[in-house]
Image (tube, grey):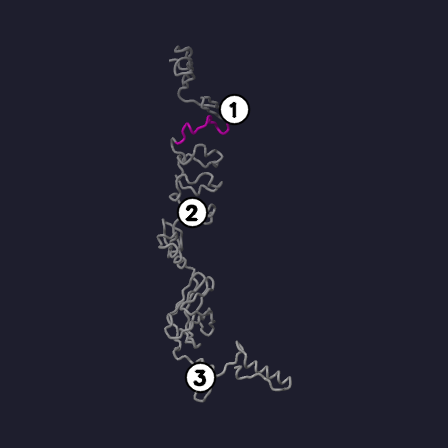
Amino acid sequence: MSRDLPAVTSPLPRDLQQFVQRVREALDSGGDDAVVTARQLIVAGLASTNSAGHLTTVVDNTIQNPSAPTNLSASGATANIIVSWNAPTYTGHAYTEIWAHTGNTLGNAELVGMTAGNSFSHNIGGTATRYYWVRNINQNGLASAYNAVSGVVGSTSSSPNFLMELLVETFGTNSQSPFFQIDTTTTINGVQVPAGTYMKNAFIHNASITNAMVQDAAIDSAKIADATIVNGDIANATIQGAKIDSATIQGANIASGTITSANIQDATIQTADIANGAIENAKIGNVIQSSNYASGSAGWKIDKTGQIEANDATFRGTLDVANASSGSRLKITSTKIEVFDGSTLRVKIGDLS
């Protein structure tokens, strides 16, 4: 353009000369400030003249009007809703707009995203529901109709299915996965197990499972290996009588010296609780005595050396006082008293027949 605008050389007033120079520079500037003529637009194919000689823009007739999207669906994940639709087939597609609202009213919907593909992930957080609409936009900026007047609903899911699918993708088939899923309440070994995702095998950190996490009657004897629970694993006063079934604890389950008198409540063990012959000599201490025994004054006492002390006594049958069954001894019956010196009877009182 500088060839069409020669420099100002005529003698003009200084202020007029500066003005004309500024106009020349503006018309001759390049870059973003360059002046574009109608001829340049026509040559570039960006414009044309109509029958009236007016300049008009050129429209690409190969770009088709956009058609409305079809087969819209919305699938809930844990914090996202995945919206998808059929890919557009018209020529000149630019992008698709995704609109959403908490209610099923298109007029209230808001634009939440745009994509050149045919799916969109809407991050809305957990436990949320949205209604969705989509429409296509072509390269000329024309918008199609929405997919439908009624929105397609989607919700973030609380179901473990989505996580299970991710786990299967990570670990392979379900047989290789450390988790398994129960879709409905199921009874396992007599215990009702609610629907959910469970671990097949796992190591549990010490102190991770507390009493509140174990359902009443959930652990029975079949789940406890022999000798697994030792005294150090049971808190004092944890196991009470109501927790022990009749005949559950047998002699083989009680270590020698484990139960002392301090562990037995008064009147807890009655005669009916002791089997015949259950208490043997080895289970009896060196002394058996009455509860009111006082040496030399009350009660009775028998020790393992054979010493007997009784405050009062009644004997029936024969009483032999001797170091042996024969020889020197004192023999007392209900009818007589006999004193033997060796095998010789020396004294006889009572029935002399």
**Rendering quarter of residue 161:** bottom left
| 197, above or below 283, in the image | below
* 10 Å crowding of disc 2: few (<14), some (14-19), many (20+): few
Residue 335, x across and y down, in percent: 40, 17
Percent across and percent down for residue 261 are 48, 33
Label 1 residue SS: loop
23 up-or-down from 236: above or below: below
Q: Quadrant of the C terminus?
A: top left
Residue, far right: 14
Q: Is residue 328 visible?
A: yes
Label 3 neighbourhood size at 10 Å, few (<14), some (14-19), many (20+)? Answer: some
Q: Amino acid at mark 3?
A: Ser
Disc 2 vs disc 1: which is toward the camera?
Answer: 2
Q: Which mark is residue 203?
A: 2
Residue closer to the observer: 351 or 320: 320
- Where residue 195 appears, as percent x and y from the top left, is 39, 56
- Span shown in magenta: 278-297
x 42%, y 41%: residue: 244
Residue position for label 1: 295
- Amino acid type at circle 2 is Phe
Q: Position of residue 221 (x, y in %)?
A: 39, 43
Q: Residues within 10 Å of mark 1 (few under 14, many from 20)?
A: few
Q: Amino acid at mark 1?
A: Ser
Q: Nearer the viewer, mark 1 or mark 3?
A: 3
Q: CA distance from mark 3 to mark 2?
A: 77 Å
Q: Main secondary structure of the magenta part?
A: loop
Q: Earlier in the sequence, mark 1 or mark 3?
A: 3
